[in-house]
């Protein structure tokens, strides 16, 4: 009877999960398959759609430039754009990490009732469209914005500081957009941490930085890894911040892909760029998964024992 009940329960779980599985197949897997197929097709003569002829030209165009005479030369433009995207995503993740650790730890040490209010305040930006919030920074960072007005009012600047349409503005927009995604997982780990371990480390003679480095950070490391993943990958494919705050001067891969599907009308090449982003994302996910596995294996030891 127990075996029959277990079998029926297993069958029921498949039926319950079927809608979610169909959702993943139809709305996630199928578009990815279409993009991969399009990346191996030819560009239509009129520049609209694709020509159903197999071609590796979209991937060749990633590293080679072909002149009108048919000569090919190595072109590192798109490799540099991928590098810029990875660099901006890494800077964004690092800035979010440095800002989120003290915020998350501070929230985790507040009384339980106040924690709920503080987490509520962290999630308030999600109530507003990202487009509207990004446009708000266009106003804040422009030459006539409140920052430049304040700098000139107190005499620190005689002329406006050019912040808008720069890489700095792009980083500011990315950090602002993804900061909550770093705070929340770190807070989730810090909330489960027993801060009496930190007090015990103080009693053993450890300093503040030693306690933070050897006791607290190892305990919240799973939240740090999750936060880095939640920030780095979306930042890698971000479109609004480099487009609106960077003014198109900050080249990131999402903007190039949008241009290929839009103004350039080179769908196979845009699909090839998208496939490369997908491959990079899968590699990053694999690295984060390996790091998370190492953390789970090493978390069995006591953090206080490492101080002795």
Image (cartoon, grey):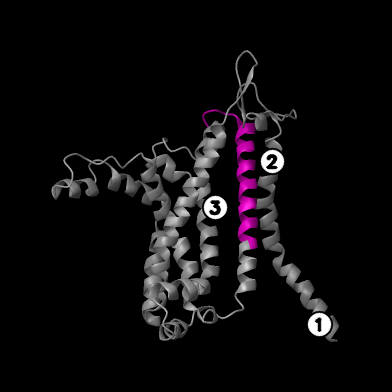
Q: Is residue 81 magenta?
A: no
* Label of residue 233 in the image: 3
Image quadrant containing the N terminus: bottom right
Could you tell me what secondary structure mostly forms the magenta stretch?
Answer: helix
Considering depth in this image, is 49 or 144 the residue closer to the camera?
Answer: 144
How far apart are labels 3 and 2 at the CA level?
20 Å
Q: Is residue 263 magenta?
A: yes
Residue range highlighted in magenta: 262-290
How far apart are labels 1 and 2 at the CA level?
43 Å
Task: Find residue 198 and report its horizontal and vertical position in percent.
Answer: 44, 81
Badge 1 marks a residue whose secondary structure is helix
Q: Nearer the viewer, mark 3 or mark 2?
A: 3
How far apart are labels 1 and 3 at the CA level?
42 Å
Query: Residue at 71% of width from left, 34% of height from top?
Result: 40
* Label of residue 5 in the image: 1
Task: Find residue 296 and report its horizontal and vertical position in percent.
Answer: 62, 71
Instruction: Judge whether residue 254 can be spotted in this image.
Output: no
Instruction: Judge whether residue 55 can be spotted in this image.
Output: yes
Badge 2 marks a residue whose secondary structure is helix
Q: Quadrant of residue 108?
A: bottom left
Instruction: Compare marks 1 and 3 and give the one earlier in the sequence.
Output: 1
Q: Nearer the viewer, mark 1 or mark 3?
A: 3
Instruction: Compare marks 3 and 2 and give the one earlier in the sequence.
Output: 2
* Label of residue 36 in the image: 2
From what the image shows, is residue 177 above or below residue 44? below
Task: Find residue 23 and report its horizontal and vertical position in percent.
Answer: 66, 57
* Label of residue 83 in the image: none
Query: Residue at 52% of width from left, 52% of height from top?
Result: 234
């Amino acid at each position: 009877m127990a075996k029959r009940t277990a079998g029926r329960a297993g069958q029921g779980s498949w039926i319950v999960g079927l809608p979610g599985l169909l959702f993943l197949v139809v709305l996630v897997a199928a578009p990815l398959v279409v993009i991969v197929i399009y990346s191996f097709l030819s560009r239509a003569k009129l520049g609209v759609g694709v020509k159903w002829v197999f071609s590796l030209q979209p991937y060749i165009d990633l590293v080679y430039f072909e002149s009108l005479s048919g000569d090919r030369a190595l072109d590192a433009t798109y490799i540099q754009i991928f590098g810029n995207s990875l660099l901006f995503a890494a800077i964004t993740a690092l800035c979010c990490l440095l800002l989120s650790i003290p915020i998350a730890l501070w929230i985790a040490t507040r009384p339980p009732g106040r924690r709920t209010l503080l987490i509520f305040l962290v999630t308030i930006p999600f109530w507003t469209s990202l487009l509207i919030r990004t446009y708000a920074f266009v106003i804040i960072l422009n030459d006539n914005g409140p920052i430049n007005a304040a700098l000139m009012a107190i005499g620190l600047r005689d002329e406006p500081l050019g912040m808008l349409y720069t890489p700095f503005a792009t980083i500011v927009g990315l950090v602002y957009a993804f900061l909550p995604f770093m705070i929340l997982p770190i807070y989730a780990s810090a909330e489960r941490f027993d801060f009496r371990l930190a007090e015990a480390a103080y009693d053993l003679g450890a300093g503040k930085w030693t306690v933070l480095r050897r006791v607290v950070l190892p305990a919240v490391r799973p939240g740090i890894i999750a936060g880095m993943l939640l920030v780095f990958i979306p930042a890698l494919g971000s479109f609004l911040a480099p487009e609106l705050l960077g003014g198109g001067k900050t080249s990131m891969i999402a903007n190039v892909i949008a241009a290929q599907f839009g103004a350039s009308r080179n769908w196979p090449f845009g699909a090839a760029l998208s496939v490369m982003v997908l491959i990079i994302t899968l590699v990053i996910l694999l690295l984060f998964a390996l790091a998370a596995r190492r953390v789970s294996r090493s978390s069995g030891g006591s953090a206080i024992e490492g101080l002795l």
